[in-house]
């Protein structure tokens, strides 16, 4: 090819090149045209020439597979041909055909009969030239065995005669550079049109790709945000679970203490009641006090008979066993004996009252103030806003780190549930109301249990930020500052509805703990544009801090 090209270049001649059709293509085309009405199922055309030996698999007339037969003998026997064909079929991983058609120099009736003996379910026959008209009377030319030797020449001739009519495959294996070089006009109007279409297709595809990429980036960012939110919720759930576990252990401990103390150590209460009764009824004395099983025996002396009845009415299940009159130095006295049941003491209520007193303020005035303000602190529905107090005209700047527990936050700015929130789910609303009632009653164990349970079960509900704020606020009033700061954590996210109000409560918590962070929090609040009522509350806090007027 290179020699021909150089010769044409040196002699300034223009040559045209074209390869002959491949044997595979011409054989398969001729086979399809000859057997076009019989090609149903799986049919295999096997060509056995002196050097060219191949098998072609057709399914319903469609060329599916070409198998090379590895037969090295120049004149192989029938067993070798059959075994090599079977090997080629097995190596290709295909099932046996339903029909085998033989052609070529080595094709014969004997070979067909031998193959049928080896392939029981396969029909084997020689190539039949249905469309070939032979005018001679020679018997040899009418025999398929003789004609099969010339299958390829016959196919080439038939293609040359009926190239367009019978739809033979256009075959040209020249390099594309040579084919393009033979064209008189390399770029025509249709080429420009195709170029324009290609440009438009690439532009549209690029635009779609960029849009898809943008959507993908947005979805990736959303996924990152959701993963961050999920981790925060999981951390919150872990904290709530730990707190609830600790509270359950505390409840179990209190229940165990109640079981242990049941029926024990009632003497303090008994003596207090006897002392109070004898003080209210003077001129009375106890001469003997003893316990027999669950009964208390009291022997005494009094100067008034009515005192005996008063003593008996003081105790449950009491009986007057004996009353006798006597005189001592002309004074009338009555000697009596009483029997009554040992009193039952509710130790759990007593322990809760003592712990509530420990968490309250240390002075009687402070204790009374906190007790009065605990009556109702959580709104069960949307509160009515009160008239705002006048804003102070001047606030003393905070320059000193203090440790103060400020008073209650103005009820008008506290978060509350709206009618829409309460109407969303009746069961969740009932659970929310239970939490509200527990806070309003001041039951320190119950409101914590109800609050943490609500947050663990309904963390995504719109009522959760409200429950979280009131739980932290209640803990702040009970001086549980670290627990209050921990409960408030998720409300401090910038996306929280009560972010600013939660910052105010966080500033109060850090002020109560003596943490200088409260200075930065109040300063940050002062720089923001806030509702007037919230600005008034912040101004009141700063004024109280400047005066050191905490609780």
Image: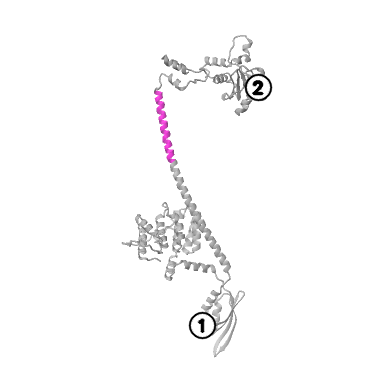
Q: Is residue 332 above or below residue 479?
A: below
Query: What scheme was used to colour the molecule?
Result: one colour
Which residue is at 49% across, 63% downward? 444
Q: Quadrant of residue 522?
A: bottom left
* 202 falls in the magenta region: yes
**Residue for badge 1:** 282
Secondary structure mostly seen in magenta is: helix
Single out the residue that lies furthest toward the top: 137
Q: Which residues are magenta?
A: 189-215
Q: Give percent across and percent down for residue 460.
A: 47, 52
Q: Quadrant of residue 323?
A: bottom right
Q: Is residue 279 above or below residue 367?
A: below
Q: Give percent across and percent down for residue 408.
A: 41, 63
User: Toward the viewer: 37 or 504?
Assistant: 504
User: Toward the viewer: 37 or 264?
Assistant: 264
Q: Give percent across and percent down for residue 307.
A: 54, 81
User: If the image is split into quadrants, where does the C terminus sit?
Assistant: bottom left
Q: Quadrant of residue 150?
A: top right
Residues at marks 2 and 1 touching, judged by CB atoms closer than 8 Å: no
Which residue is at 66% across, 25% downward? 121
Which residue is at 55% across, 86% downward? 333
Q: Is residue 366 above or below residue 77?
A: below
Instruction: Determine if residue 332 is in view.
Output: yes
* Side of 234 relative to 535 (left or right): right
* Side of 221 relative to 162 (left or right): left
Q: Nearer the viewer, mark 2 or mark 1?
A: 2
Q: Give percent across and percent down for residue 142.
A: 62, 12
Judged from the image, the secondary structure of the residue bearing numbered disc 1 is: loop
Give the total of numbered labels.
Answer: 2
Are there few (<14), some (14-19), or many (20+) residues within 10 Å of tag 1? few
Which comes sooner in the sequence, label 2 or label 1?
Answer: 2
**Residue for badge 2:** 80
């Amino acid at each position: 090819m290179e020699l021909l090209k150089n010769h044409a270049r040196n002699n300034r001649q223009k040559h045209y090149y074209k390869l002959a059709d491949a044997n595979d293509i011409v054989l398969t085309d001729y086979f399809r045209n000859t057997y076009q009405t019989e090609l149903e199922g799986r049919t295999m055309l096997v060509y056995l020439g002196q050097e060219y030996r191949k098998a072609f698999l057709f399914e319903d007339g469609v060329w599916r597979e070409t198998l090379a037969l590895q037969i090295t003998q120049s004149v192989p026997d029938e067993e070798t041909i059959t075994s090599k064909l079977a090997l080629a079929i097995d190596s290709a991983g295909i099932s046996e055909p339903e029909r085998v058609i033989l052609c070529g120099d080595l094709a014969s009736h004997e070979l067909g009969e031998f193959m049928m003996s080896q392939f029981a379910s396969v029909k084997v026959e020689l190539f039949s030239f249905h469309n070939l008209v032979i005018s001679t009377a020679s018997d040899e030319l009418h025999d398929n065995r003789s004609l099969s030797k010339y299958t390829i020449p016959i196919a080439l001739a038939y293609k040359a005669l009926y190239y367009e009519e019978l739809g033979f495959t256009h075959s040209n294996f020249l390099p594309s550079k040579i084919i393009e070089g033979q064209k008189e006009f390399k770029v025509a109007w249709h080429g420009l049109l195709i170029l324009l279409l290609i440009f438009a297709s690439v532009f549209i595809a690029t635009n779609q790709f960029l849009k898809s990429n943008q959507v993908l980036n947005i979805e990736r960012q959303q996924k990152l945000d959701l993963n961050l939110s999920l981790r925060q919720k999981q951390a919150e759930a872990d904290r709530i679970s730990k707190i609830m576990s600790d509270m359950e252990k505390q409840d179990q401990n209190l229940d165990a203490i109640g079981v242990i103390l049941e029926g024990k150590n009632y003497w303090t209460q008994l003596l207090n009641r006897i002392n109070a009764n004898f003080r209210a009824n003077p001129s009375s004395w106890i001469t003997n006090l003893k316990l027999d099983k669950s009964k208390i025996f009291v022997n005494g002396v009094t100067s008034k008979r009515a005192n005996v009845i008063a003593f008996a009415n003081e105790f449950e299940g009491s009986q007057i066993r004996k009353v006798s009159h006597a005189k001592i130095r002309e004074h009338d006295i009555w000697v009596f004996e009483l029997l009554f049941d040992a009193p039952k003491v509710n130790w759990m209520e007593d322990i809760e009252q003592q712990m509530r007193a420990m968490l309250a303020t240390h002075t009687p005035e402070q204790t009374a103030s906190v007790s009065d303000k605990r009556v109702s602190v959580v709104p069960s529905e949307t509160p009515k806003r009160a008239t705002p107090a006048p804003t102070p005209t001047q606030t003393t700047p905070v320059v000193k780190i203090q440790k103060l527990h400020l008073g209650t936050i103005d009820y008008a700015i506290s978060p509350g549930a709206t009618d829409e929130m309460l109407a969303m789910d009746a069961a969740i609303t009932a659970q929310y109301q239970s939490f509200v009632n527990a806070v309003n009653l001041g039951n320190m164990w119950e409101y914590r249990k109800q609050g943490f349970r609500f947050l663990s079960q309904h963390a995504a509900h719109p009522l959760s930020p409200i429950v979280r704020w009131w739980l932290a606020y209640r803990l702040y009033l009970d001086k549980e500052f670290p627990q209050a700061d921990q409960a408030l954590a998720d409300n401090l996210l910038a996306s929280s509805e009560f972010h600013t109000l939660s910052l105010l409560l966080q500033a109060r918590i850090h002020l109560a703990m003596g943490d200088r962070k409260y200075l930065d929090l109040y300063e940050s609040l002062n720089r923001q544009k806030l509702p007037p009522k919230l600005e008034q509350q912040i101004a009141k806090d700063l004024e109280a801090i400047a005066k050191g007027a905490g609780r």
